[in-house]
Image (spheres, rainbow, N blue to C red):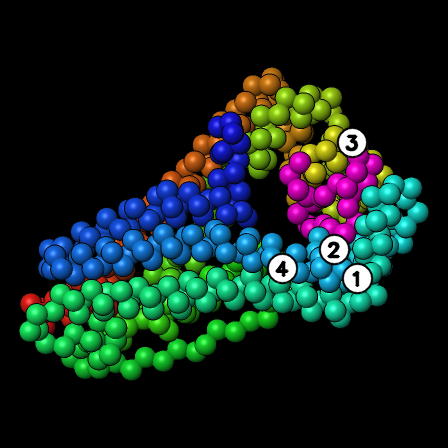
Amino acid sequence: MSLVNIISAIGNNNSVYPLLVRDCGVENPIKIALTYKQNIDESPKVARYAVRERTIDEYTTSAVWLGAIPVVEAASDMFISKKGYNPKISARLFKEDAVKNPVQGIEFNIKKFANSTSKEVQAAVADLIKVRDNKKAFESLVSKKFTAAVAIPMALIGFIIPKCIFALSRKIAEKEKQNQPDYSDILGMSDITTFGQKKDVSFTGFASTVATLTTPDKMAAIDGGYAVGRVLTARKGYEPFDIAFKMAGMLYLNYVAPKQIEKLFNFTSARIFKSNVNLDPKLLNNKEFISDVENNRFDFLGRMNGAQMLEYIDNNPQSPFTKYASMFKKVTMLTQDSRDPRIFVDIKDLENFGKDIFSFSKDALNSKNLTKFAKKALRVKSGNIISNVALSSFLLSYVLPKTQFALRELFTGSKLEPGLINIDNKKR
């Protein structure tokens, strides 16, 4: 994979690649080191337990997040196929709206593509007809697929993994005990004292309907459930508050902040460097795309909305715009002459993509040297992506834990992990 492709992957904040880089490559090792440093001065024993718990927690959680969802969805797709339905069909096609989305829907697509002479398209239409005629059965299967994809990782990450980690600490502590007082409170069997008195903490449960979730919605639901699960399974005393602060910060810094930083960097770069940097680095580095820009093949996009762009793609399946829209998964082509009618198209996303191409093309053609303009845009965009990953990783791996530790010490009077504070008899 080329450097540009790597930068493109980690710059896509709607994918798991930035999470993979931040979590496994940067955040986890730094957080483990900070956990050790935070506890070592007051109690080497607690530091040892805390590092063990943090290491197991961070990497098993990452493994489940990266592996469980695709595995569960692949198994679900096999089950749906055995029931006679095509799992590729987007359930969102059932939500036909003649006003907001007048160019797609299950009935609309069946009628539009019914007269195609392509065997592949005819097969796709047959898939749509079967689903339409068995809507309740198909929706039930899709609902179960989404539920499994959300519930299984949520249960593992939010409830099962922390309980197993706590059980491991308890087992090790019991083996190390030699005529020591009972430390069963390591698992929250008794409260630690905070502010001079016991604190009874209650939290509401997490529930959501997942049958019609998009991928970003599903990711948010899983992480929201994960956060609630970690709070509910926390050991008593201050630990639920400690974990709640950390999880709230992680949700914001993982899913909201990178997009806000991206917008800020793109806006600032456009003003400072006079370069349009909304496009993906792979496109900016594509010589054929630059040639298409030079030949002014995207001028029409400035006069179109998203629905009109989709119509254009259907009427011009081999045009440069169709090719790039397919390349960046704005549409899914079934054959060279037809997009896949089973796949829902995000009209707004397609429109933004087309407008960004038009804007870049306009600015590039108005520049003194189009090639230099494109290379400059590529450098600026790549710099923005790397800076975004670096900044968000720094916030996640250093600023958030440091803030968490400061609040912990402020409210408990101790630097130690609140769930492990009673493991060291010297601290009792």
| Residue 193 percent coordinates (x, y) | 18, 77
- Residue 1 vertical position relative to residue 178 in the rendered view, above or below: above
- Tag 2 and tag 4, C-beta contact below 8 Å: no
Q: Is residue 238 left or right of residue 337?
A: left
Q: Which mark is residue 76?
A: 4
Which residue sits at x=33%, y=49%? 28
Pointer 1 residue:
131
Q: What residue type is labelled 1?
A: Val
Q: Which amino acid does label 3 sit on?
A: Ser
| Label 4 CA crowd tier, 10 Å (few <14, some 14–19, many 20+) | many
- Tag 2 and tag 1, C-beta contact below 8 Å: yes
Q: Give the range drawn in magenta.
A: 327-350
Tell me which label, 2 or 1, sits earlier in the chain.
2
Mark 3–mark 1 Cα distance, whole angstroms, equals: 31 Å
Tell me which label, 4 or 1, sits earlier in the chain.
4
Q: Which mark is residue 319?
A: 3
- Tag 4 and tag 3, C-beta contact below 8 Å: no
Q: Which mark is residue 86?
A: 2
Q: In which quarter of the image is residue 302?
A: top right
